[in-house]
Amino acid sequence: MTIVVDANVAVHWTIASPHSENAERLLRSGVPLIAPDFIIVEVTNAFFSNIREREDRVERALDGLEFLPRWFAELVPATTLRHRAMAYCLELAHPAYDCYYLALAESRRVQFVTTDEHFLRKVKRFPSHARSVVRLADWKP
């Protein structure tokens, strides 16, 4: 079993939050994790936003960026997902980033784990996609 995780999950491996315990449980599970390669950019941006709020987090964020690629079995080039992702953007009327993660999950026939409640609510209205997306708190190995 392989799992797609998004930046919403990956950030919680480094930055403490209410989701950190579940995010770390997923990371420690040993299940191979994959994501579109732009997850590095998204997590970097999230760390930057977090650092601006609290400068004492700089070292932790830099450590997280160092380890981030190693936590993934594969970082998939986003260019390979662009057509399916665009189709999902149009179908779901939703921004591209989440649709790329969904495109990867559905192309590999695996689950996409996220903490993005807005996306979870939206995708649940589409039965053909709903089974592919799982809330982090509900994920079981």
Image (cartoon, rainbow, N blue to C red):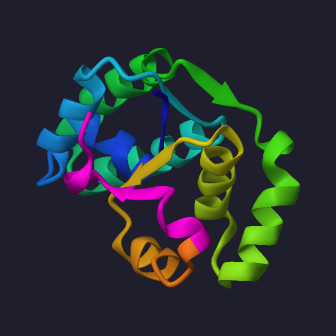
Q: Position of residue 55 (x, y in %)?
A: 23, 43
The image quadrant that residue 65 belongs to is top left
Q: Position of residue 22 (x, y in %)?
A: 17, 42
Q: Is residue 37 left or right of residue 137?
A: right
Taking the magenta stretch, the answer to whether it contains residue 116 is: no
Q: Which of 9 and 92 lies nearest the eye of the viewer?
A: 92
Q: Is residue 140 left or right of residue 70?
A: left
Is residue 56 depicted above or below 100 in this figure?
A: above
Q: Residue at x 20, y 32 (%)?
A: 24
Is residue 49 depicted above or below 64 in this figure?
A: below
Q: Position of residue 30 (x, y in %)?
A: 32, 17
Identify the image quadrant of the C terminus: top left
Is residue 44 depicted above or below 115 in this figure?
A: above
Q: Which of 124 and 51 lies nearest the eye of the viewer?
A: 124
Q: Is residue 125 left or right of residue 13?
A: right
Q: Position of residue 50 (x, y in %)?
A: 30, 52
Q: Residue at x 65, y 50 (%)?
A: 106
Taking the magenta stretch, the answer to whether it contains residue 140 is: yes
Part of the protein shown in magenta: 128-141
Look at the image and tell me whether residue 14 can be seen: no
Q: Residue at x 73, y 70 (%)?
A: 88
